[in-house]
Amino acid sequence: MSAPSHVMNTYGRLPFALSHGRGCRVWDTEGREYLDALAGIAVNTLGHGHPKLVPALQEQVARLIHCSNYYQMPLQEQLAAKLCELSGLSAAFFCSTGLEANEGAIKIARKYGHDRGIERPEIIVYEKAFHGRSIATLSATGNPKVQKGFEPLVEGFIRVPLNDIAAVRDVARSNPNVVAVFLEVIQGEGGINPARGDYLRDLRALCDERNWLLMLDEVQCGMGRTGKWFAHQWAGIVPDVMPMAKGLGSGVPVGAIVVGPKARDVLGPGNHGTTFGGNPLAMRAGIETLRIMVEDRLLDNAAAVGERIKSGLQREFAGHKGVIEIRGQGLMLGIELDRPCGDLVGRAAKAGLLISVTAESVVRLLPPLIMSAQEADEVLRILVPLIGEFIAAA
Ligand SMILES: Cc1ncc(COP(=O)(O)O)c(C=O)c1O
């Protein structure tokens, strides 16, 4: 019998441990090889052991890992400038995780309201949304399972369904305290549910009309995953507040809130901060990740390889009983089945493929952005028969 674990039991874990990786491949401690179509849940942008990233991080570790925000931070300046250039926004605050970025966005929205004389500011949030597991971000999340047991929830959120602009207009008419709209451009944990382009443009117009902040959670769908730097860029809009994290540091924890002119001066000295946020190692990871993404044309790769997987899935599952829809963009894809399919995660791992299942019945693919066309074909070769057998057996 194995010894009792001293790690708190908060995750359902598969029965193996990963030991090392190279590119889109990882190996477990027993020497079994896996093709990684999950990238640590959209984190390992550059895959594993990237030959350009590793030496840069080694150099940074030897030079300076951490210093406090008491000092000038040239690497923060550098990464912030790059994120602003890519997004058309004007300033960034750095933290370490997605929930922290979202928590900061919620604080910005509330302070923005207070600055305009709204004492009980409200934020419009969405059914099936996921924004994190702190008390405020789980309150903004639209999944009762994430919230259960942690009540009382934080107040000040009004929930609407996705892609229904009339619902937002109704809230606007009846509630003078709204200060912001907060949504994922493609809901990740909620089942790969995209906000439509016309819906995002309508929201942008409504936010301008009402002087609300448009806050787009790009934690999972951002950082080039959809084939543009940020998923909202497909709709041709610019948000006021953009929380991001996951892929930004290629595995080194880095989060950011990137803001436009409406939000850039809302927080001042003493309003917000975090010890680890923006430390030199994290900033170097972000800077090098972006540099390598440009050098290696990874946006184009994400778009092309993602399309190859998506069209392959659509071809294989056209009219297939049990497959409801294949959706998503670039390398953020979901295959919705007509039944819970969590078992597929373990079955895929046994067959040498790392994937996840979200919202109970959606097989989710989030591979590293370096995935090749050959590896994409291998994903299809392993996954398609597994899903076919799973449906046939049930
Ligand atoms: C859209 C979105 N926002 C926020 C988060 C929370 O990020 P983190 O787990 O880094 O706190 C996640 C995590 O899955 C996410 O997908």
Image: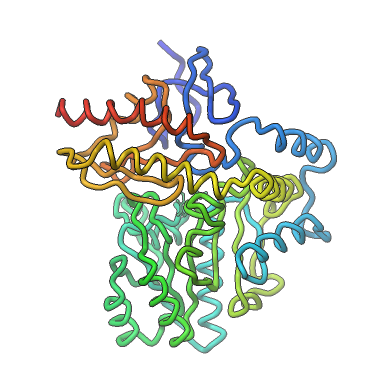
Residue 191 pos. (x, y %): 33, 49
Give the side of residue 31 with respect to residue 144, left or right. right
Residue 84 image-quadrant placement: bottom right
Nearer to us in this view, 134 or 199: 199
Residue 77 to residue 172: above or below? above
Residue 171 to residue 20: above or below? below
Q: Is residue 149 visible?
A: no
Residue at the spot 34% in from the left edge and 52% down from the top edge: 190
Residue 129 pos. (x, y %): 36, 58
Residue 96 to residue 167: above or below? above
Give the side of residue 307 with respect to residue 343, left or right. right
> Where, quadrant-wise, is the C terminus in this rendering?
top left
Nearer to us in this view, 281 or 116: 281
Nearer to us in this view, 183 or 143: 183
> Where, quadrant-wise, is the N terminus in this rendering?
top left
Residue 376 image-quadrant placement: top left
Q: Is residue 242 visible?
A: yes
Give the side of residue 362 with respect to residue 333, left or right. left
Residue 46 pos. (x, y %): 60, 39
Residue at the spot 38% in from the left edge and 32% down from the top edge: 12
Residue 131 pos. (x, y %): 44, 57
Residue at the spot 31% in from the left edge and 87% down from the top edge: 173
Residue at the spot 28% in from the left edge and 82% down from the top edge: 170
